[in-house]
Image: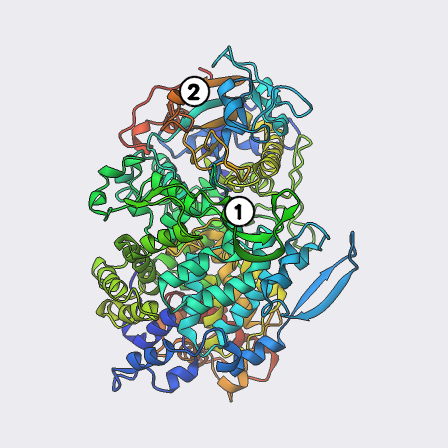
């Protein structure tokens, strides 16, 4: 865990909460008295609102500001003429976002050929929308969880074009729809999603020698977790503790092999041959092909599956078994606590969350209830400085804090890609790492600082800081540094931070900074970036 | 900020180069050897072991499609022609002279021709049927075990540091991990710090040098960052200090054009690095190596090996890119060859039998490639277990007859117990005596 903040009392509990449950506080949140010690129930009431957003698929209606920003946003697309296409160089709206899979699926096809930037376009658009929502959404907690689930059920849209083509639907109809919902329903939405079917290859799995990729990660990453992998027992299922009474402690390779068989026939309409002249349609939609299913008897997690069940029943039963397993509750609650509280969350907190998870496993708002329990636990407010912001959180929280009216641009997305947090582009099915050490490498630190300086100086035309709003009149440099600390994170300024910034900038404490002049504005913008480079702003 | 340290930081590498005689200093482009006699400042107590480049193929590379007994009937029976190295035809594999299993026709994948040349030139040795003794088929468990240098999953929870970190230790490394002589003993070329280097303050994660590494915002920002990072001793502050120190040390040695832009890299030996993950990463390693800042270890990740589906084309592309990158690196670093070793490894091999997606699923035994001037190359090493059902691990996968730690311990030349607790293995003889 990180070291102590020099002056912990200066960090408001509400700021910590909003750094974990939102993409950081906005000055208005702090001004509105959120976290006021006179209203100790503010967090519970904030959670009440945040955890019951309207229909998540209707973002534009329940959050008109975000709807307008999504409608207004444009990203550049540019490529020379090629084999079968003419040159393009234009600012284009985020036209992929609302499209159904069959409209985007041609981007994945080999013929007719499609220019590379068109194939990557859906990923860039979803990344741009993610930035807009992270900064501007009213439903901040949902956005935090959407980020969590995108990583938990990671797909790599920067690799195979078919994953990129499927990403807008995956984001909209799978991740966003279920982020606060029921895990079993979520799991099935993921299993039948075009994005996951492509990414973990289940679409090409066939009876005979099934493709094990999806089944392996279903157990290891999506549900029970690697701590429940009892590989030494390999195929000796009877020796798995609890297996003989139908409650095995964990899973073995044989479970992976059998589950892979259960999911054969779950595939996509991707034009694959069905024998003879018959082919699947080419829409990219999920479908089930009985002829590809391995219908014979199976045994998964100690349960016998009779041969020749009804269509998709084998796969559904596997999803039931893994969703209900106690190891899944532990694994998912550990991951949620790691995201929301600390890299190494206390066992007691995980156990508390797992109880809520299990007690509510058939509720439609199971996940929301677990998140609420974590956020209202004593550990949540007790633990400090146990997380370092990832680049997306750094960018969004800086924009929110500094009052940048952030508009995503291609260069900003490029910088974010280079920061190590390439959104929807992590190659391994683990998703971006959540532990802080992964984000503290030398080159990553440099990128982190570049992001802050580039935003403060509007280097990528993402929107200027409204200095006049924060600084109506000339003021001494020390006061300006202090004020930026208050704006960005509330509470009192840290004298060590003020001294470090003044010394590094070669400014006397009483040197006057005059807004509206070039020299004054340049310095005030840089001070904002430097305050955000201090340790305190980088923790959550 | 560290240029003035140049004269005292040569020890580790220069001594490792074995060039103290100085007989080569007249060669063009070898300015650094002026420092080669400066052995006295080597701060490490034990004999320097040159530089080790660890290339990790992420995803479980199908070594049975890279180095294979092409005529083995069990091999031919288990795999469709698309998943096999062929013994004949236009895409026949490249025959390897070997004594591992003289009755079998071991061949390299046809797109690994650059590796075949290095093998024929006796620079490259291949250890087959090597891997973890643990039976895990999980990428992430297997990678964790290997990067932490342990054999058993029970030990994962109590082994936080990487095997390289334990090998090199932090002895002599100062604040931020860079010792008084201003060395950068270890780099990783992934954005996130390499797990094998975990626990080693002096390790730098530097994916790419082409844009330079100076902190953004010029000297003013550097001064502010230096002051801010002295505030405390939290993880962020420590990382900031290490980054500021290490990045400027590397950045200060990057040749620049008149306008301040980092000059394009001028590889030696006619080497051409492609714009691939392996090409970019090995070029970065070569550049840092040639800065003579005491580089002992470079960890390089190359992805794209998890070939559950349509393996033939993907694997051929990956093998071609990797082979050409290794050949470029070899040509570019010939003058360091005497004490430069590269090992190529993966977390496990893949299933002997293919699946119906024209791919292969997770398996067990794999192979390790070892390249360098000290390598007794042109040999297949280890013990070939055979591919008949009763010879396979769990009846399905290539068995592991050589622990991966056997190979790594021989290469590091240090007491194995430090990097690999509890491991005692006899060297295979990968290196020439």
Which of the pair B359/A516 is nearer the observer?
B359
In this view, A414 is above or below A67: above
**Which element is circle 1 on?**
helix
The mark lying in front, picked from 1 and 2, is: 2
Q: Chain of mark 2?
A: B
Residue assigned mark 2: B388
Quadrant location, the C terminus of chain B: top left
Give the residue at mark 1.
Answer: B250
Q: Position of residue B91 (x, y in %)?
A: 66, 26
* Label 1 packing within 10 angstroms: few (<14), some (14-19), many (20+): many
Up-down: is A163 above or below A30?
above
Residue drawn at 29 percent across, 79 percent down: A44
Q: Secondary structure beneath disc 2?
A: loop
Q: Along the horizontal axis of the image, is A437 left or right of A354?
A: right
Q: Chain of mark 1?
A: B
Q: Position of residue B309 (x, y in %)?
A: 54, 41
Q: How is the image coloured?
A: rainbow
């Amino acid at each position: 865990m990180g070291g102590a903040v020099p002056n912990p009392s200066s960090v408001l509990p509400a700021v910590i909460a909003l750094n974990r449950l939102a993409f950081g506080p906005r000055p208005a949140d702090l001004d509105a008295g959120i976290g006021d010690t006179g209203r100790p129930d503010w967090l519970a009431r904030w959670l009440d609102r945040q955890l019951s957003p309207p229909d998540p698929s209707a973002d534009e209606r329940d959050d008109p500001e975000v709807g307008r920003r999504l409608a207004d946003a444009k990203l550049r697309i540019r490529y020379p003429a090629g084999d079968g296409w003419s040159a393009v160089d234009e600012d284009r709206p985020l036209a992929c976002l609302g499209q159904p899979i069959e409209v985007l699926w041609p981007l994945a096809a080999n013929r007719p050929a499609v220019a590379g930037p068109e194939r990557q376009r859906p990923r860039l658009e979803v990344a741009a929308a993610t930035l807009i929502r992270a900064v501007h959404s009213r439903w901040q907690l949902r956005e935090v969880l959407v980020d969590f689930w995108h990583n938990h059920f990671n797909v790599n849209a920067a690799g195979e074009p078919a994953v990129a083509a499927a990403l807008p639907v995956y984001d909209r109809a799978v991740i966003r729809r279920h982020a606060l919902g029921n895990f079993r329903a979520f799991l099935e939405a993921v299993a039948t999603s075009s994005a996951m079917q492509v990414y973990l290859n289940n679409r090409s799995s066939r009876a005979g020698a099934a493709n094990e990729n999806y089944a392996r990660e279903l157990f290891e990453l999506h549900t029970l977790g690697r701590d429940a992998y009892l590989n030494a027992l390999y195929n000796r299922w009877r020796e798995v503790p609890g297996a003989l009474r139908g409650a095995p402690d964990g899973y073995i390779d044989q479970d992976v092999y059998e589950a892979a068989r259960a999911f054969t026939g779950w595939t996509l309409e991707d034009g694959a041959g069905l024998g003879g002249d018959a082919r699947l349609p080419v829409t990219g939609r999920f479908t089930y092909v009985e002829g590809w299913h391995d219908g014979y008897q199976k045994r998964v997690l100690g349960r016998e599956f009779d041969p020749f069940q009804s269509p998709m029943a084998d796969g559904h039963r596997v999803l039931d078994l893994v969703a209900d397993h106690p190891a899944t509750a532990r694994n998912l609650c550990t991951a949620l606590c790691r995201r929301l509280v600390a890299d190494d969350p206390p066992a007691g907190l995980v156990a508390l969350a797992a109880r809520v998870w299990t007690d509510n496993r058939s509720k439609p708002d199971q996940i929301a209830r677990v998140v609420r329990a974590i956020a209202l636990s004593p550990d949540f407010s007790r633990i400090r400085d146990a997380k370092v912001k990832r680049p997306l959180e750094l960018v969004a929280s800086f924009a929110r804090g500094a009052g940048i009216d952030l508009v995503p641009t291609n260069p900003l997305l490029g910088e974010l890609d280079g920061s190590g947090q390439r959104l929807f582009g992590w190659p391994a099915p683990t998703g971006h790492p959540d532990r802080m050490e992964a984000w503290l490498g030398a080159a990553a630190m440099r990128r982190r600082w570049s992001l802050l300086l580039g935003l403060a100086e509007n280097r990528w035309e993402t929107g200027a800081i409204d200095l006049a709003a924060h600084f109506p009149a000339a003021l001494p440099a020390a006061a300006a540094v202090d004020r930026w600390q208050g704006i960005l994170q509330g509470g009192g300024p840290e004298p060590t931070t003020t001294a470090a910034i003044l010394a590094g900038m070669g400014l006397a404490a009483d040197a006057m900074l005059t807004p509206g002049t070039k020299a004054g504005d340049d310095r005030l913008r840089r001070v904002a970036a430097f305050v955000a480079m201090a340790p305190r702003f980088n923790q959550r | 900020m560290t240029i003035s340290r140049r004269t005292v930081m040569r020890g580790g590498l220069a001594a490792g180069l074995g060039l103290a005689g100085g007989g080569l200093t007249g060669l063009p482009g070898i300015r650094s050897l002026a420092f080669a006699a400066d052995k006295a400042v080597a701060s490490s107590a034990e004999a320097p072991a040159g530089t080790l480049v660890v290339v990790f193929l992420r995803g479980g590379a199908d070594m049975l499609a890279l180095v294979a007994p092409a005529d083995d009937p069990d091999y031919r029976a288990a795999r469709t022609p698309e998943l096999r190295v062929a013994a004949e035809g236009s895409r026949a594999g490249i025959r390897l002279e070997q004594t591992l299993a003289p009755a079998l026709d071991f061949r390299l994948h046809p797109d690994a021709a650059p590796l075949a040349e290095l093998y024929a030139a006796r620079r490259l040795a291949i250890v087959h049927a090597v891997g973890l003794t643990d039976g895990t088929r999980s990428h992430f468990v297997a990678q964790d075990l290997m990067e932490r240098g342990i054999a058993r999953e029970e030990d994962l929870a109590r082994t936080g540091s990487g095997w390289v970190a334990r090998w090199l230790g932090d002895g002599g490394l100062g604040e931020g991990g860079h010792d008084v002589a201003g060395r950068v003993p270890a780099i990783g070329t992934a954005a996130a710090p390499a797990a094998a280097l975990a626990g080693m303050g002096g390790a730098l994660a530097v994916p790419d040098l082409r844009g330079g590494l100076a902190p953004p915002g010029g000297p003013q920002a550097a001064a502010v960052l230096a002051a801010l990072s002295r505030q405390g001793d939290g993880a962020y502050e420590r990382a900031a200090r290490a980054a500021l120190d290490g990045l400027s040390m590397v950045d200060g040695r990057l040749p620049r054009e008149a306008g301040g832009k980092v000059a394009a890299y001028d590889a030696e030996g006619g080497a051409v690095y492609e714009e691939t993950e392996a090409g970019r990463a090995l070029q970065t390693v070569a550049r840092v190596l040639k800065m003579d800042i005491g580089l002992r270890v470079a960890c390089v990740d190359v992805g794209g090996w998890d070939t559950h589906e349509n393996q033939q084309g993907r694997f051929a592309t990956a093998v071609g890119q990797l082979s050409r990158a290794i050949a470029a690196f070899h040509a570019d670093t010939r003058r360091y060859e005497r004490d430069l070793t590269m090992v190529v490894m993966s977390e496990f091999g893949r299933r002997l039998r293919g699946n119906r997606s024209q791919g292969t699923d997770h398996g067990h035994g794999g192979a390790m490639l070892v390249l360098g001037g000290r390598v007794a190359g042109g040999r297949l090493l280890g013990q070939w277990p055979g591919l008949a059902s009763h010879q396979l691990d769990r009846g399905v996968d290539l068995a592991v007859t050589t622990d991966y730690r056997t190979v790594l311990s021989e290469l590091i030349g240090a007491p194995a117990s430090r990097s690999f607790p509890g491991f005692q293995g006899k060297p295979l003889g990968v290196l020439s005596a």
